[in-house]
Amino acid sequence: MLSELLAGAVSDAEQRRLSRPLATVEADALARPAALDALAALAPADRVKIIAEIKRASPSRGALADILDPAALAVSYETGGASAISVLTEGRRFLGTLADLEEVRAAATIPVLRKDFIGTAYQVFEARAAGADMVLLIVAALEQKTLLSLQELIRELGMTALVETHSADEVGRALDIGASLVGVNARNLSDFTLDQDLFGALADRIPSGVVRVAESAVKTAADVAHYRAAGADVVLVGEALVTSDPIRTLSEFLAV
């Protein structure tokens, strides 16, 4: 599944490149105001922090929410106390677009993550051109050389990479490239099964000074508390927010 998603995302980017060449996207990226400091926004604190996700659908759950106005939802997330906003921009299975990211960036004052299946420099320049402050890199999807080069490009553009892992080996690879924001995804991207205890099993491998992000398998405040007790600085939440009153749900989650 992961290979299919990455191949599709890269192919779609190549189609966009036909009408919007790299030089154009790079110029747009460099013309953007400086990216917001995501590491400062997500730095460890006395209470857990939330990255709130704008997500219409997923391969595992199908359609979740129409989200006709991503900007309005982003404002609700920020009002509710989210520290950052994640925007799914993958179109085939998650029904997202770069336009969603642009609308969210225009409406929000907190850092915004481009969550997609990133495999090329073109996609990184697209992210900055659309206003992203963070870009997701999935260790399992990338060779180490590519992972390193994309991380370096993200930094050169003033953004922060959220480097996603699923195993001890992948945590090691993330640390080897100097990742400062490391996520552990409870969802296996090969078969989409969930293991909520995976974060706790890997958290001690992520040193202090690196922000620890728990991803997936969050439905209730108890799930947030579970991750917080295991050492999460930040929890990324999607489905639970788009299928509920986001401000009320964020209040419950941030109270743990």
Image (cartoon, rainbow, N blue to C red):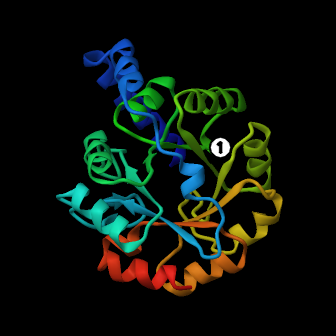
Q: Position of residue 71 (x, y in %)?
A: 24, 55
Q: Position of residue 87 (x, y in %)?
A: 38, 52
**Secondary structure of the residue carrying numbered label 1:** helix
- Is 25 left, or right, of 183 in this rendering? left
Q: Check disc 1: other Cα within 10 Å, few if <14, some if 14-19, many if 20+.
A: many
- Is 71 left, or right, of 155 in this rendering? left
Number of numbered discs present?
1
Between 30 and 96, the residue placed more toward the observer is 30
**Which residue is denoted by mark 1 in the rendering?**
139
Residue found at x 80% / y 47%: 172
- Give the image quarter of residue 12: top left
- Give the image quarter of residue 208: bottom right
Would you place residue 127 above or below residue 219 in this image?
Answer: above
Between 145 and 70, the residue placed more toward the observer is 70
Residue found at x 36% / y 65%: 78
Residue found at x 37% / y 17%: 27
Residue reaching furthest left? 68
Would you place residue 32 above or below residue 95 in this image?
Answer: above
Task: Give the quarter of the figure containing the C terminus.
Answer: bottom right
Q: Position of residue 25 (x, y in %)?
A: 35, 21
The three-letter code of the residue at mark 1 reads Val
Q: Position of residue 212 (x, y in %)?
A: 67, 60
